[in-house]
Amino acid sequence: MQRIAARSRLRRNISATGRDAEERVFQAVLDAILDHRLAPGTKLVERELSELLGASRGAVRAALARLGHGLLVELRPNRGAVIANPSVSETRDLFEARRVVEAGIVRSVASRMTPAIRRRLRAFVAEEAGAYEKGDAKTGQRLSIQFHKLLSELAGNTVLDRFMEHLICRTPLLALAHTGHSLSYCGAGEHRAIVEAMLHRDAEAAVAAMNDHLAHLESQLRLDDSVRPVRLAEALGIAGPETRRDVKPAASAGRRRKRKPA
Ligand SMILES: [Zn+2]
């Protein structure tokens, strides 16, 4: 329903050019990445995005440039844009960076604990546990990301917060690049352990719980390159006139990828 509503909004009165149109394209692609709907290697065809999202080609180009700046999209001269496909070493680097940054974040939240922060953390943990109890995987997945964003916001350092946003946005791509599917979600249990330590103002226990959590996420990655590109319209939640599914990928045995010119 939401999608239909969004689509009819698109048809009605929104501008195809300027900052709003650029933001619309940027958010649509970013949301699809965060929801694990756009796999690494998926081509982002300017014309197609422009038609699907009712934005001018200029607005699409500007949005793609921003996504490229955040390393979410690779812009290849004369060959267009594709969703970035992080390598094994980039993946390890990203988790290493998350460990460093998020250790600083939980330490900071634990040390500046206030009743207001306490309430927000408790409410979050309850909401997340509730989603899993109801079997609402979609909400669980969104909350998985939001938890880490919430902590970086509560740490009260705007530079760290922006840095974290950059790291978090790239994580779903690593999952898809290196498992071929979404990571199983963070789960409420590990988040609760981190929160409990922070509520007790025990910075070292919070850091240890966060490290365990990130190590657990990283351990789920299979460091091979299977990717599963999907139709752009489908990934953006806009069913095009032809909704044919892509042909299933061939069995991976013996399949060659990324052949480089000799
Ligand atoms: Zn998590």
Image (cartoon, rainbow, N blue to C red):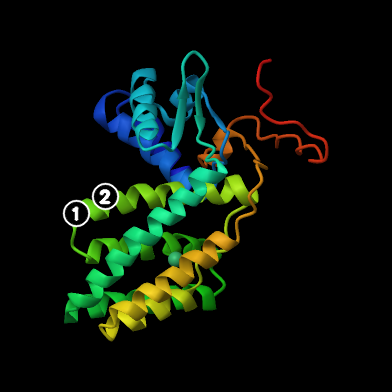
The answer to whether residue 259 is above or below residue 42 is above
Residue in view at x 45 percent, y 55 percent: 95
Q: Nearer the viewer, residue 207 or 144?
A: 207
Q: Ligand 1: does it lie within 8 Å of the C-beta at label 2?
A: no
Q: Position of residue 30 (x, y in %)?
A: 41, 42
Other residues around mark 2 within 10 Å, as few (<14) / some (14–19) / many (≥20)? some
Q: Position of residue 91 (x, y in %)?
A: 51, 48
Q: Nearer the viewer, residue 243 or 173?
A: 173
> Which secondary structure, mark 2?
helix
The answer to whether residue 193 is above or below residue 32 is below
Residue 122 visible in rendering: no
Label drawn at residue 158: 1
Q: Position of residue 86 (x, y in %)?
A: 52, 40
In the displayed orientation, state which residue is furthest to the top: 78
Give the side of residue 98 with respect to residue 111, left or right.
right
Measured in 3D between alpha carbons, the distance from the residue under mark 2 to the one under mark 1, in whole angstroms, is 6 Å
Label drawn at residue 25: none
Tell me whether circle 2 and circle 1 mark residues in contact (CB < 8 Å): yes
> Which secondary structure, mark 1?
helix
Name the amino acid type tagged 1. Thr
Q: Position of residue 78 (x, y in %)?
A: 49, 13
Please state the quadrant of the image where ligand 1 appears.
bottom left
Residue 256 visible in rendering: yes
The answer to whether residue 2 is above or below residue 130 is above
Residue in view at x 67 percent, y 42 percent: 226
Give the side of residue 187 with respect to residue 56, left or right.
right
Q: Nearer the viewer, residue 101 or 148?
A: 101
**On the image, numbered disc 2 is attached to which residue?**
162
Name the amino acid type tagged 2. Arg
Specify the quadrant that holds the C terminus: top right
Residue in view at x 43 percent, y 73 percent: 128
